[in-house]
Amino acid sequence: MLAAMASLGPIVIFFSIRTTSCSFMILLNVAACSVAGILGLAFLLRTLHQLVLIIDDQTRPVRRPESYQPGKETRYLSRPDANENQDHPIEPDASAKKDPSGSLDQVGNYTNRKAKSVFRIWILVYALVDAQMSWVLRPLIGNPNIPFEWFRERQRNFFEAILRTIGSFFS
Amino acid sequence: MRFLYINDILRSQAWAIQEGHFRQRLGQLLFLLVAFGLTYGLVMGSYPGDYGPRGLQVLYSALKVPVLLMGTFLLSLPSFFVVNSLLGLRDDFGYAMLALIATQPG
């Protein structure tokens, strides 16, 4: 998420040099953080997919080639190209193959559903706390028309302030 | 190049979330979090307005961004742990936490 934010830095710098509107800068930074957050979500989903493959790999034992080394070019059973490497094919254990009821898959799907629910809750909680935390730690951008201060006094909340900023930007 | 592991993190390579060498991995992820946080913080605080750049604001914003993300993560973690436990996923909590930590700098 932060790599995405840092990559947007040059664009934000460009606008910050070329504008005198503080409202615009606040909204631009909120937009940059939102874009980075969405990219972070995509990253999290991809990482979770990797996580599921790793756990799946551990719960369904495979016969590994002798050259296998943890962390190096791991080939997972669930990947579509898992058996393409003819030099070192990975074959499922006989015990994993013999699962006529498909109960392992059912357990896996049930766990996946629960994991997705947990991460939906995490995303919601994280977004709300992050928004309010950014409000508590303000000024992050700093209004150049008022003197510098370490922290601002407690008032309103993040969402109300954004609505006000949008209002002042268009007025 | 020692810092090329950012490439691995961005591409969600398995090492970032596999168990083992937890401390080293955590250190690398935290280093990236602070480095990128400082970078964006510098950008955020550099808005000059009408009166030119303000050094103190730039420095303060650079310090605040990593604090913002780490603080949010730590505040949200207990609820995440409880929800994981309630849904019977506590065994995989270590993995899930590494995935979340890897998401911060990635």
Image: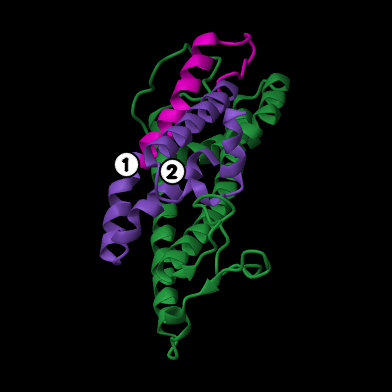
Q: Secondary structure at mark 1?
A: helix
User: Tell me, what colour scheme is on the image?
Assistant: by chain
Residue B12: give x, y in percent of width and height.
Answer: 57, 50
Q: Colour of chain B?
A: purple
The residue to which callout 2 is attached is B101
The spot of residue A57 in percent (x, y) is 47, 65
Q: Residue furthest front?
A: A66
Nearer-the-camera pick, A44 or A69: A69
Q: Position of residue B49 (x, y in %)?
A: 63, 16
Q: Residues within 10 Å of mark 2 (few under 14, many from 20)?
A: many
Residue bounds of the magenta highlight: B44-73
Identify residue for label 1. B75
Query: Would you say A86 lies left or right of A29 here?
Result: right
Q: Amino acid at mark 1?
A: Leu
Nearest the viewer among A24 and B100 is B100
Position of residue B88 relative to residue A130, above or below, is below
What residue do we see at 38% from left, 42% from top?
Answer: B22
Of circles 2 and 1, the one toward us is 2
Tell me which residue sits at (62%, 28%) in the image.
Answer: B1
Which of these two is toward me, A136 or B81? B81
Give x and y (percent) for residue A17. 70, 19
Label 2 is found on which chain of the structure? B
- Main secondary structure type of the part rendered in magenta: helix
Q: Which image quarter: residue A25?
A: top right
Residue sitting at x 64%, y 31%: A24
Going by the numbered disc 2, the residue's amino acid type is Ile
Rounded to the nearest whole Å, what is the CA distance between mark 2 and mark 1? 14 Å
Question: Can residue A44 be spotted in the picture?
Answer: yes
Q: Image height check: is A26 above or below A17?
A: below
